[in-house]
Amino acid sequence: MYEGAIQDLIDELGRLPGVGPKSAQRIAFHVLSADPTDIKRLAAALSRVKEQVRFCVLCFNVAEEEQCRICRDPRRREDALCVVEEPKDVVAIERTNEFRGRYHVLGGAINPLEGIGPDHLRIRELMARLSSGQVTELILATDPNTEGEATATYLALLVKPMGITVTRLASGLPVGGDLEYADEITLGRAFEGRRTL
């Protein structure tokens, strides 16, 4: 539609996850009209991320050093390990201030339709961490969707023979939600996970 550099920018922005053609075009024209200093700062931040950020050698969270800040923290519990799909899930759990253990980032979830099997995830590394005998509880915090459930079930079957307690995050109704808007699966899980008051 456009020519040269602006079309190249639109095409590259359109390759980003969650950015459709219209959003890519809007961002490209924002970049075009933005202050050059702001654009240089954005370009520098993008370059710095690619140069400095890597994955933690223990848990595979994002880190600027060999280990992430959570793995370096001696106050974190060694006996509880929370398994998540992506580094962004670590951030979500950390915001709750409820979990003081350590993490393991799988790098995705089992999804046969996309060609992602157990060998494509960091399950071998997880099993190596569990073999040390320090972990007594494995918390499966994969997404509450088909892929996340399949991954959690697979991991539970794999780990249970090791004698480690395997738990799954509860799922159900959101606070402030209305029952009439809840889908059947969410409402069913809320009934399954009910507790005594």
Image (tube, helix red, strand yellow):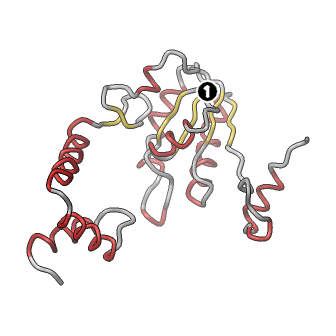
The front one of 146 and 13 is 13
Residue 87: x and y in percent read 44, 42
**Callout 1, which amino acid?**
Ala
Residue extending farthest front: 35
Q: How many marks?
A: 1
Image: 60 above or below 6:
above
Residue 119: x and y in percent read 43, 47
Image: 105 above or below 77:
below
The front one of 92 and 56 is 92
The front one of 38 and 4 is 38
Residue extending farthest top: 74
Quadrant placement of the C terminus: top right
Image: 196 above or below 110:
above
Quadrant placement of the N terminus: bottom left
Residue 16: x and y in percent read 31, 62
Q: Name the residue under label 1.
A: 80
Residue extending farthest bottom: 1
Residue extending farthest left: 4
